[in-house]
Image (tube, rainbow, N blue to C red):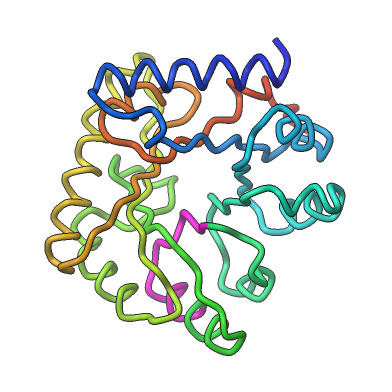
Amino acid sequence: MGIAEGLASVRSEIAAAARRAGRDPASVTLIAVSKGFPAAAAAAAAAAGAVDLGENRVQEALEKMEALGEGALAIRWHLIGRLQTNKVRLLQGRFTLFHALDRAELADALQRRLTAEGRRLPVLMEVNVGGETTKAGTTAADAPALARRIAACDALELRGLMTVAPPVPDPEAARPFFSELRRLRDRIAADLGRPLPELSMGMSGDYPVAVEEGATLVRVGRAIFGERNPA
């Protein structure tokens, strides 16, 4: 199955899941995760109608933007992976949304850099709902305090929450993690007294369940691009 067919299949699954949940399929944004694939694959996805592309690493994203030239301007680029504070300078207004703000140190570094550049960046707070020691993300217990810290940064626009669910053999087993993130988002929004409309959750193995649980952004790579080359 090619990239265009993969995109069409994922969009069909998203629409079906949204209808099962009584939602408008248009309320879900599909992010085609091109990390680990060449720029040609990202270009093929864009040519097939993918408007939103996701990358884990700033450097890889910038290389693809350069390779795509003017074609990169029509894409909304999402930075979905962990960001080191010394890489904040590389963002340079290139990204539509940063999904993985997970610590106060990074919020402060972004605030300083963005203020100096006169920019504002929409962000999501990453929460490690599964409590996995190998994954990034603040804990659910610490999330409200971190959300308040981010909300106090006027160069950051907190739009919602993100999570990576633990790998499970049955997508249904991921449902409790998605519902937990939704409930946590609702509590934090109430605490802040402002809406947090975005929930970034769901990947190739579980995105239909995530949509049923309220995902507004799903990050899908393998189901669109195929298996990555381990090299």
Q: Nearer the viewer, residue 35 or 231?
A: 35
Q: Position of residue 181 (x, y in %)?
A: 25, 44
Q: Is residue 9 left or right of residue 89?
A: left
Q: Position of residue 36 (x, y in %)?
A: 71, 37
Residue 25 position by quadrant: top left
- Let me know if residue 129 is in the magenta part: no
Extreme residue toward the top, this view: 1
Q: Nearer the viewer, residue 199 or 140?
A: 199
Give the quarter of the figure containing the C terminus.
top right
- In magenta, the rendered stretch is 97-109
Q: Is residue 168 left or right of residue 195?
A: right
- Let me know if residue 101 is in the magenta part: yes
Q: Is residue 44 left or right of residue 167?
A: right
For image coordinates 40% across by 69% down, the residue present is: 157
Extreme residue toward the bottom, this view: 116
For image coordinates 86% across by 52% down, the residue present is: 69
Residue 208 position by quadrant: top left
Label total for image: 0
Give the quarter of the figure containing the N terminus.
top right
For image coordinates 36% across by 65% down, the residue present is: 158
Q: Position of residue 134 (x, y in %)?
A: 44, 45
Q: Nearer the viewer, residue 189 or 59?
A: 189
Q: Nearer the viewer, residue 124 or 50?
A: 50
In the image, residue 181 sits, relative to residue 26, either above or below, namely below
In the image, residue 223 sits, relative to residue 218, either above or below, namely above
In the image, residue 34 sits, relative to residue 109, either above or below, namely above
Q: Position of residue 147 (x, y in %)?
A: 27, 67
